Structures are given as structure tokens and as C-alpha cells.
Image (cartoon, rainbow, N blue to C red):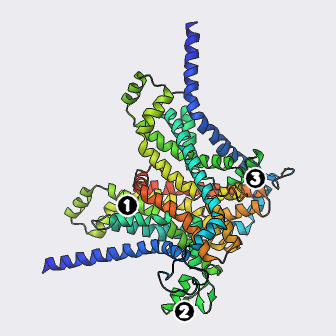
Amino acid sequence: MKTNRYVLWGMTRSTLIHVFLISIALTCLFPIFWMLRCSFMTNETVFVDQSIIPHHLNFGNFAIAWTKGNFAIYFFNSVIYTVCVVTGIVLISSLAAYSLSRLKFPGKNIIFYMFVAAMMIPLPGSFVALFVLMTKLHLVNTRLGYVLCMINVGLSMSILLFKTFFDKMPHELEDAARIDGCGKIGIWWNMAMPFARPAIAVVVIFNSLNVWNEYILATLLLGDSKLMPLQRGIMVFQGANSTDYPVLMAGLTMAAIPIIMVYLAMQKHIVKGLSSGEVLG
Amino acid sequence: MDQKVKDAAVFKENLQNFLFVFPALSIFCIFYIYPFYKMIHLSFYDWRGIGPMHFIGLSNYKELMGDHLWWDSIWHAGYITLIALTFQNALAFALALACDQEIRMKRFYRVVFFIPPVLSEVVVGLVWNWILNPEMQNGVHIGLLNHFLFITGFPQLVHNWLGDPRTALTTIAIVNSWKGFGWGFIIFLAGLQTIDKQLYEAARVDGAGRWKTFMNVTIPMMLPVILVVVILTILGSMQVFVLIIAMVNEGLVHHTDVPVTRIFSAMQNTDRFGYACAEAVIFGLVLISISFISKKLSDKAKQV
């Protein structure tokens, strides 16, 4: 009798936990489903059709957004910015972290603590001064200007992450490479980088998310619609066609799906990166 | 002679090693240090972005002290942060506790809960804006939420959620929590999994119930993790900006203003660069003192 009650309580408990978890999971997924659903409807059916899954899938919105809505350009720009910034961050920050971790020169510690401090101190309004600087340098409305600013955004965190990895690298690896006649650059590229592969994965995924989703700097620095990334382009499109929901939702889908795919493919690294606390400093 | 050669070699070595850091350091100096300095510098000037700069001392700061819209905006951000700290973090913690047990579909939940955080604020804001749409067409509510409330028998609850000054901020705060709780969840779960299971065993042997175990084992062990999440939540929610722009459009109304929108509009709409910088300096100081205080508080809590 007693065991029965225990089993019963255990079952109720696990059911309750599942109900709780599933309801929250549905809350997470439903808005995304709703966005997808509307992107397949037309302006006529979107306000009329009450069914959960629309009777007629209409792919026209994607074509309209892609061509008339300029999303082809925005999408292409977002890809370019993400690739350039992430490559830049990986190369520049791993070079710096390698030197800060394994090589010696005067002033090394000061430089390292400067990067750490930059991560700790929030600078919410520095975009005003950044804009002034970029105007002076004639980098407003250029791809280069935006890429350089975005590299700076991810730099400190990436240097910290790489450094914790390089600190753990065994000396034997370096010595072996040196005997083989590798220079410092050679050791960095052939030994340190392959060793830090998990760190590279974390740096790539977090910075990709960050660049793909960035809005403020893109708004300030890129006024020319040929240079705008997706997030900025969506807001421009929304401002011009605020009532054309199906096409807008198609645009949002195009902005959301790639990042969700990348996330699903790399989610192990995200959990690892966050769990180790390295991203948090 | 020998010493000279040696010195030259050391110098060359140091220089080589320094060159590794040089690209990172120069980007950092140009795009971080210089704007940092320039922000403080400009805050003492009256400047319209072009033309002459007038040094006006502390006038920008004096004006800021009496600027009700500015202090209101800080309060709005504080309100959003308060909801994030309580509602969002409690939800994240409860979900993490639920997922820390032997249950099925653990990985599925972990993947799903982190989907809102990977979406951009623009996407989240516009999708929710569409769900919360207040309009009607042909007698049908366009917005999903109002439609849902109507057909489930709560027509009195149908509301212009984002248009009404009394509900706009709370609605934004809840969407902000929807987007943010996944971060806390992942970090809390990782923290829970590092707690030694023997501690729970020991507590049970001592005859401690679930609640006692939770209060005396889980909470103390999780304190450092809770601190990290609290600071991240404060810094993140205080700076929320793009989400608001996406949800209530460019035509910003003052009752959903937050500090970053004030800074942005001082710069973009009224061309008052000096004033915008003064706002940025004050806001930066507010953020730094909040995170400093919460760090101090939690250090104290840890010692007890």
C-alpha cells in the first residue's frame, strides 16, 4: 500500500514537471511557428484563415521580400559581415592571446588587464563617440568601418577565451615544433590553433550570433541601403510597408532560420561555452 | 660589443612578440579607448555634430539632473530589469531544477529553451508586435493574443497592449523576459550539475526533507552562479533598446523610453552630441555602481 502511494506520487510529480516544461517549450516555439505560418499566407487570407496550418501554402512572399524588399542584398551583406568579422576576430584575438599567454615582452600584463577591464566595464553610450570618430575617419557608410567596429566588439571576450586555452597547452608541443624548425608564427598556426579548436568553435558561434543579430551600429554607420545587413534592412522594410504582414514575416523568417540552423548544428558548443563560464569572464 | 649584440637580440625578440598583439591592441585603442575618452570629453561641450564646439563645463550635467524624461527612462529600464530579475530568473531557476532530474526529453528542452536567445531583438520584437496587434478587421481581431482572448471567452481582456501607457512597459518587460530566460536556464543548469550528488545523499541521511535540502544545500552551492546570472540580467536588461524600437516602432513615445533610446534620440533627432555623451557617462556610472553593489552584497551573503 505504502509503495503504491509512493509510485503514484512519483508519477504525478513527473507528469507535473513535464506539463510545466512542455508548456514553456510551447511558449518558446509558438511565436516562431506563428511567424512561419503567416509568411506562407497572402494579404487576403492572413486575416481570414483561422486554421492553425494554412490551407494553401504561398511561397510568393519570399520571392517578393527577396527581390522587391531588397532582402537579397541585405542577406548577402549579413553573410559578408559575419564571415569577415568572425574571421578577423579569430585571427587577431588568437594571435594576441598566443603572445599574451606564451611569449614574453615588457608591458604584457598591463595589456592583458586592459582587455579584461574592457569586458567588465559596460559602455552603453559609447556609440555616440564612435560615430564621431568614424565620421572623422571617413568610415561611415563603408563596409570596412562596420567590420572594424564589430571586430572590436568581440575582441576582449575572444582574447580571454583563447588565452585560457593556450595557458593549458603543454610545453612539449611547442618544444617539438621548435625542434622541427617552426618559427613563432608557425607554432601559433600549426600547434596552438589546432590545440585550441574547442575555443575556436565557441568564439565562432558566439560572435556569429552577435554579428548576425547586431542592429545599433548598423543603424548608425550604414545609411546606404546597399550596405545594410538584414536586421537593419528589416526595420527599413517594416517602416515602408508596415501593414504587409505576410511579406514582413517572410523577411523575418529569412533572418531567423539561418541562425537557428547554425544554433542547432553547434548547440553543444554553446552549452559548453556557457557552462565553462569562459564566455562570462 | 657582445652586450650590444645581446641587447639588440632581446629587443628584436620583444618586438616580435609584441607584434602579435599589435593588431588587437591598435583596434582596441582606436575603437574602444578613444571613444571612451571622447565620450567624456564631448560631455563638457555644446556641439551639433558639425561646426564649432563650445566648452560649457558642467552645463550638460546640470541640465541632465533636472531632465524628467531622462530619469523616467532610467526608472523604465529599472522596471524592466526588476521583472527580469524576479519573473525571468525565477522561471529560469525552476526550469533548471526540473531539468536537473532524471527525466525524459531533457536534451529537447535544453535546445528549445535557448531558441529565443539566439533570435535577434528585431525578429522577436516584430513577431510579438504582430501577435499583440490591437486592430480589428471585418469584426475579427488581427492580433493573435486579442483574438485568442476573444474566442476563449475573455472579451473584456482584449486590450491595446503596446498602445496603452499603463500596459506598454510591462508587455515589453515580459517579452524581454521571454527572450532572456534561456541564458539563465543554461547557466543555472550547468551550475546545478556541478553540485556533488553526495551532498544530497548526506542531507537525506541526516533526515532533511526536500525543502530543507534545497535551502541548505542547493541554494548555498548555487550562490556564485546566481550572482553571475543576476549581474548579467541587470546589465542586459538595463541596456535593452532594439527590442523596444522593434515593438513600438520608430515613433517612440516617452512612456517606453529607456536610457539608450534617450541617448540615441539626443544624438539622431536633436543633434545634441554633447548632451548625448553626458547621458552616456551618467548611465555608464549607474550601471557600474549597480554591478559593484550587487557584487559587494553577494560577497557578504557568501560569508554568512
Q: Bin the neighbour count of mark 2 within 10 Å (Cα to Cα): few under 14, some 14-19, many 20 and up.
A: few
Give the Cα separation between the discs numbered 3 and 2: 51 Å
**What residue does disc 3 label?**
B43
Host chain of mark 3: B
Marks 2/1 in contact by CB < 8 Å: the verdict is no
Residue B77 visible:
no
Give residue A152's position: percent from left, percent from top.
Answer: 61, 46
Q: Residue furthest left?
A: A1
Residue type beneath disc 3: Ser
Residue type beneath disc 1: Leu
Relative depth, front residue between A167 and A94: A94
Q: Bin the neighbour count of mark 1 within 10 Å (Cα to Cα): few under 14, some 14-19, many 20 and up.
A: many
Give residue A143's position: percent from left, percent from top.
Answer: 67, 49
Q: Are marks 3 and 2 on the same chain?
A: yes
Q: Secondary structure at mark 1?
A: helix
Q: Does A71 appear above or below A249?
A: above
**What residue does disc 1 label?**
B189
Identify the residue shown where x is 28% and y is 69%: B210
